[in-house]
Image: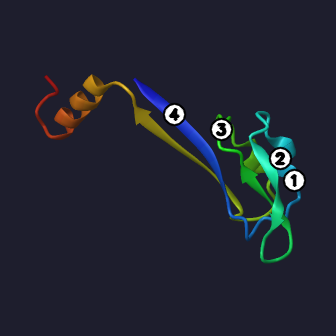
Amino acid sequence: MTEEISYPVINKELCKGCMRCIVGCPQNAILLSDDMNDAGYQFAYYSGNGCTGCKDCYFTCPEPLALEVHQYKKIVNDSVAKMIKAKAAGKGGK
């Protein structure tokens, strides 16, 4: 069994605070900071939970490289992890 983990990574120095990612996020997982970046803009940040990996924030962001959505799969069941490691080691997984 695997669990998919998704989260946006926002480069606060490239973000211009246009709020498109905030409005575009159906889970309301992105917020606008009260702080300013070095260019003097309030920047968006991930609240820490709620991201489903839909990438709506990524596709609405007009600033190249300001926002990425990271996704990875986490193996939850240890028996599955052992089987995968055994197969990778060429032992057949049994």
Secondary structure at badge 4 equals: strand
Q: Quadrant of residue 64?
A: bottom right
Amino acid marked by disc 4 = Glu
Q: Position of residue 34 (x, y in %)?
A: 84, 59
Q: Is residue 60 visible?
A: no
Secondary structure at badge 2 equals: helix
Q: Position of residue 6 (x, y in %)?
A: 58, 40
Question: To which residue does mark 2 refer?
Answer: 22
Question: To which residue does mark 1 refer?
Answer: 19
Q: What residue is at 79 percent from the left and 34 percent from the top?
A: 26
Q: What residue is at 86 percent from the left and 61 percent from the top?
A: 17
Whole-angstrom CA distance, mark 3 to mark 1, is: 18 Å
Question: To which residue does mark 4 refer?
Answer: 4
- Residue 70, above or below 40: above
Whole-angstrom CA distance, mark 4 to mark 1, is: 26 Å
Dot 2 crowding, Cα within 10 Å, few <14, some 14–19, many 20+: many
Lateral position of residue 94 relative to residue 13, left or right: left
Closer to the N terminus: mark 4 or mark 1?
Answer: 4
Amino acid marked by disc 3 = Asn
Work out whether residue 63 or residue 16 is closer to the camera in this orientation and state it. Answer: 16
Dot 4 crowding, Cα within 10 Å, few <14, some 14–19, many 20+: few
**In front of the other: label 4 or label 3?**
3
- Residue 19, above or below 75: below
Work out whether residue 62 or residue 74 is closer to the camera in this orientation and state it. Answer: 74
Whole-angstrom CA distance, mark 2 to mark 4, is: 22 Å
Closer to the N terminus: mark 4 or mark 3?
Answer: 4
Whole-angstrom CA distance, mark 1 to mark 2, is: 5 Å
User: What numbered label is drawn on residue 34?
Assistant: none
Amino acid marked by disc 2 = Ile
